[in-house]
Image (spheres, coloured by chain):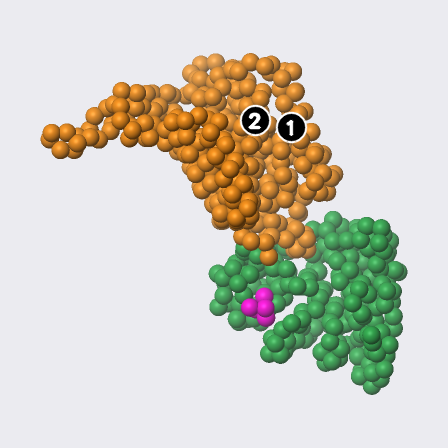
Amino acid sequence: MELGPYILLASLEGAVTAAVLALTAVGLSLVFGVMRVVNIAHGEFFMLGAVIAWYVANALSGHPAIGFFAALLIAPLLVGALAVAADMTILKRLDYDPERTIVATIGLLYILQQLTLMTYGPEARPVEAPFNTRIALPWVEWGESGLSFYYPWGLSTTSYKLAVIAAAAFVLLGVWAMMARTKLGLVMRATQADRDMALAFGIPVERVYAMVFGIGAGLAALAAVLIVPIQQAHYLMGADPLLLSFIVVIIGGLGSLPGTVVAAILIGLSDGIISVFFSPTLAKILATLLVGLVLVFRPQGLFGARAA
Amino acid sequence: MLELREIDAGYGRAQVLRSLSLSVAPGEILCLLGRNGAGKTTTMKAIMGLLPLMSGTVWLDGQQVNSLPAHDVPRAGIGYVPQGRRLFSGLSVSQNLEIGMMTRGSDRTVREEVLDLFPRLRERLDQPAQTLSGGEQQMLATARALCLRPKALLLDEPTEGLQPSMIEAIRQVIVRMRAAGVAILLVEQRVDAVLSVADRVAFIENGQNGETMSAEALRADHSIVDRYMGV
């Protein structure tokens, strides 16, 4: 096989990573943007989404699609509710102080991780995909009769992977519509712009914060449910999404949703391509290097507004 | 009637206001005068519930508002035009007004009335708030507060750094609000600007009440201004 098909294959893998990463990172970005809280436990909300998906899929018999779609609904709701509870019992009591919330969410990370280890156990468990048809992909070449299609061996993807990309794009559009077009989004953006003025204009900031923290965690859980048929649920699976989400959020510009999505696509695709041709470690090294460069040369991120 | 009864307030353990009392009647402009750091802005934040009171009470038309959570204070009918305008940046002019409209669920007609007061805003409805000129931003900050249909209006240095024509426009709106029966608490640095609109003037010194007098009396005897404001 020549180079072209490899790149297509790597890009497709990268696109799946990018889609899931975009969802996770948008959740983190939303929380940071509106609440100014750096949520170290974000990866654990992701992990919980995958673990709950396994429990739900296991509890429901019948066609795997039933369990999966139930998980798609239940896991984000449960994780979101847990995050709302964590906000009201922990973050609110710390007055959303930037430093103390970092320490508190580190604690939350270990609590969630260890509780999962104690109940769910150390195994990695798969959730069956609702559909998983192999789709062979064509490639073009110049033959004797001009341009022609052929199907190189090994160049394929699955219907499920394409569905993950589509689903992530759909949810991201939904998040954008919520922020740009709804009253809830307006209230969230006003709170982000000026917390005290939001209070002075009757916005119940504490309720907005609880909701944002819940939505952020729910997005991470949703991303995990989408990836769990490809990756398996494991109690330590939250570390990578957390690191990558931070990388994406910093590159995209803290609190900027379009920047986060663009950076997720950039990091996801390059992660896929570099992992296929070189090694996953090199991909992480380069991504982290990029963060360093962004922090030095454009601290506000690619899309972030410079602080006034 | 907006009434402060012996309020103590401050930041953390640093007390700024000491047993401060004020009252503003409907259709009256009370101007708060004092040196920098005397506690004028702190008074406004304390009324809005943005600073917890250490003691004392705040009343609006017989309703005790200092016991409400901060986001319910504006819903009782207090509009706030803060120092430095503090618009919701990133939101358009129209969206900034929308936030004001949502506070007390104002009727659509209120928005039209407010835009009639500030026709320049009508031309810029879709523009991001932070791209407006200083004067237009002040108009928007005022308009946003008027969208509440407030019973009491707090204005913190609304003419700071504006050109004379803008100052005049803001002044006229304040006077119209007084005619409409709004209780207006005004903080202003420039004494001459105050004397042309205020009904009464309350001096504040080190967070405590100074003299309170009618604006007329102050116009007649300027010396007291130097006592409280002189360097």
Q: Chain of mark 1?
A: A
Tell me which residue sits at (52%, 49%) in the image.
A298
Does the magenta portion include B135? yes
The residue that disc 2 covers is A238
SS state under label 2: loop
User: What is the letter of the green chain?
Assistant: B
Name the disc covering residue B180, or none: none
Q: Give the quadrant of residue B41.
A: bottom right
Left or right, B38 with reference to A194:
right
Q: Residues within 10 Å of mark 2 (few under 14, many from 20)?
A: many
The residue that disc 1 covers is A109
> Given the image, on which type of amino acid does mark 2 rest?
Gly
Q: Position of residue B92 (x, y in %)?
A: 52, 58
- Cβ–Cβ under 8 Å for marks 2 and 1: yes
> Given the image, on which type of amino acid does mark 1 rest?
Leu
Does the magenta portion include A2? no
> Earlier along the polypeptide chain: callout 2 or callout 1?
1
In this picture, which residue range is highlighted in magenta? B133-137
Q: Nearer the viewer, residue A173 or A110?
A: A110
Q: Position of residue B167 (x, y in %)?
A: 64, 76
Q: Give the quadrant of residue A136.
A: top left
Name the residue furthest left: A145
Q: Give the quadrant of residue B151.
A: bottom right
Tell me which residue sits at (61%, 62%) in the image.
B144
Q: What secondary structure is the stretch in magenta mostly built from?
A: helix
User: What is the letter of the orange chain?
Assistant: A
Q: Residues within 10 Å of mark 1 (few under 14, many from 20)?
A: many
Residue B10 in sight here = yes
Left or right, A265 with reference to A213:
left
